[in-house]
Amino acid sequence: MGYHGAAGEYGVLAHTISGLAFAEIKMNGEIVGEPTLFAGYATEIGVLLLAASGDDHLCKEVAHQFPHARQIITKTSLGAGASKTSHHRIQDAVKQAVQAAGNTEVSSPCTPPLTVEIRMMRQIFADAAALLPQVKRLSANHIQFTPADHAEAIGMLSALTLMASAL
C-alpha cells in the first residue's frame, strides 16, 4: 500500500528504494519499482500480489507487470511533488481483491535468472559500487549485477543505498 512510481518514471515522489542513489533500475529489461522487487520476492515464496495502491502512474506500472492485481488509485499525479487526491476506499478495494483472488496463478514480471542494471544518480556512487566483486561497471553511472533471486537483489540494492547515503 502507498507505493510510488519507479525511479526514472513519472509520478509523485517517484523512486525505487532511494531517490538519492538510483536514477533508474531495470531487471531482465523491465523497469523496476518497489512493487516489482517486493511482489517479485513474494512470488518466489508463493505469495500473490492481490492489490497495490498509489498514484495513477504507479497503478499503470502494476497493471503492466501484475495484470491480475487490483490497482487502487489514491491520487492523480500533477508532477513530482504535486497531486490531486482521490477519495477511494482502500479497505473495500483490498477486500474485493481478496474475495476475487480464487485460484489466480502466482507470477512475477521478472523470474530468475535475474540481471539488474542500475543508472546511479552520481558517478561516485557507481565508483563505490564497482568495488564490489558482484558488480560490473557498464559506464560512468551505469552498473550491473546478477542476483540469484529477488531477496538477493533487494539486499544488494539496500547495500548500494547505504553506500550512496554515506558518500
Image (tube, rainbow, N blue to C red):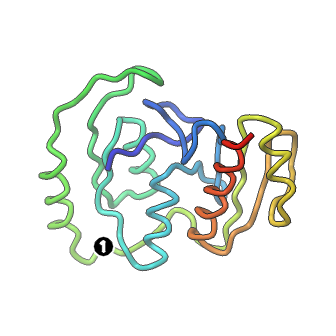
Q: Nearer the viewer, residue 103 or 131?
A: 131
- Image point 45% across, 21% down: which residue? 79
Residue 47: give x, y in percent of width and height.
37, 74
What number of labels is visible? 1
Looking at the rendering, in which quadrant would you find the C terminus?
top right
Q: Looking at the picture, does residue 84 appear above or below residue 69?
A: above
Residue 134: give x, y in percent of width and height.
81, 66
User: Relative to 108, is 53 on the left or the right?
Assistant: left
- Image point 49% across, 69% down: which residue? 41
Q: Looking at the picture, does residue 74 appear above or below residue 129?
A: above
- Image point 67% across, 61% down: which residue? 156
Q: Secondary structure at mark 1?
A: loop
Q: Looking at the picture, does residue 105 appear above or below residue 18?
A: below
Identify the residue under disc 1.
104
User: Relative to 49, is 163 on the left or the right?
Assistant: right
User: Relative to 137, is 151 on the left or the right?
Assistant: left
Residue 11: give x, y in percent of width and height.
45, 31
